[in-house]
Amino acid sequence: MKVDQEITDIIPAMKRGKINSYRPEDIRRWGVARFLQATTVDEPFFGVFPEFTEAENKAMDALLAEGDKGSV
């Protein structure tokens, strides 16, 4: 019966522009793999921030690329 509860238990979607937080006990209940699949971004993030200089944007892009490789 517990397995059915985990499958039907809905993981709240992340809200754009808001700070999202999930309790550790909820993540354990949902299962880490299922939680990450439901909440991670599938497509790359390409943001342009006009308030930063071109050098700052390039530095942020480099850090994001490193993070995608798992080194940050």
Image: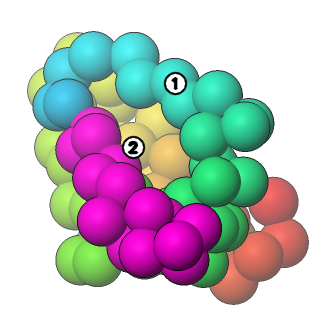
Question: Element type at marker 1?
Answer: loop
Which residue in the structure is indicated by mark 1? 21
Vertical placement of residue 40 versus 4, above or below:
above
* Of callouts 2 and 1, the N-terminal one: 1
Q: Nearer the viewer, residue 47 or 6?
A: 6
Q: Which residue is mark 2?
A: 57
Quadrant of residue 19 in the image?
top left
Quick one: SS at disc 2?
A: helix
Q: Quadrant location of residue 70?
A: bottom right
Residue 52 in view (yes/no): yes
Residue 41, horizontal then vertical, whole percent: 32, 66
Q: Which residue shows up at 52% across the image and 24% down it?
A: 21
Q: Give the percent coordinates (x, y) of residue 6.
A: 48, 66
Q: Residue furthest right?
A: 71
In the image, residue 21 above or below residue 54: above
Quadrant assignment for the C terminus: bottom right
Does the magenta segment cover residue 21? no
Is residue 14 positioned above or below 15 on the image?
A: below
What residue is rendered at 66% in x and 67% in y?
Answer: 32
The segment highlighted magenta reads 1-14
Residue 2 in percent (x, y) is at: 58, 67
Residue nearer the viewer, 42 or 10: 10
Q: Hey, what amino acid is under mark 2?
A: Asn
Mark 2 vs mark 1: give the one in front: 1
**Marks 2 and 1, how far apart in space?**
27 Å
In front of the other: 27 or 60? 27
Task: State which quadrant residue 49 falls in.
Answer: top left
Determine if residue 68 is in view: no
Is residue 7 magenta-colored? yes
In this view, the residue farthest toward the bottom is: 69
Q: Are marks 2 and 1 in contact (CB under 8 Å)?
A: no
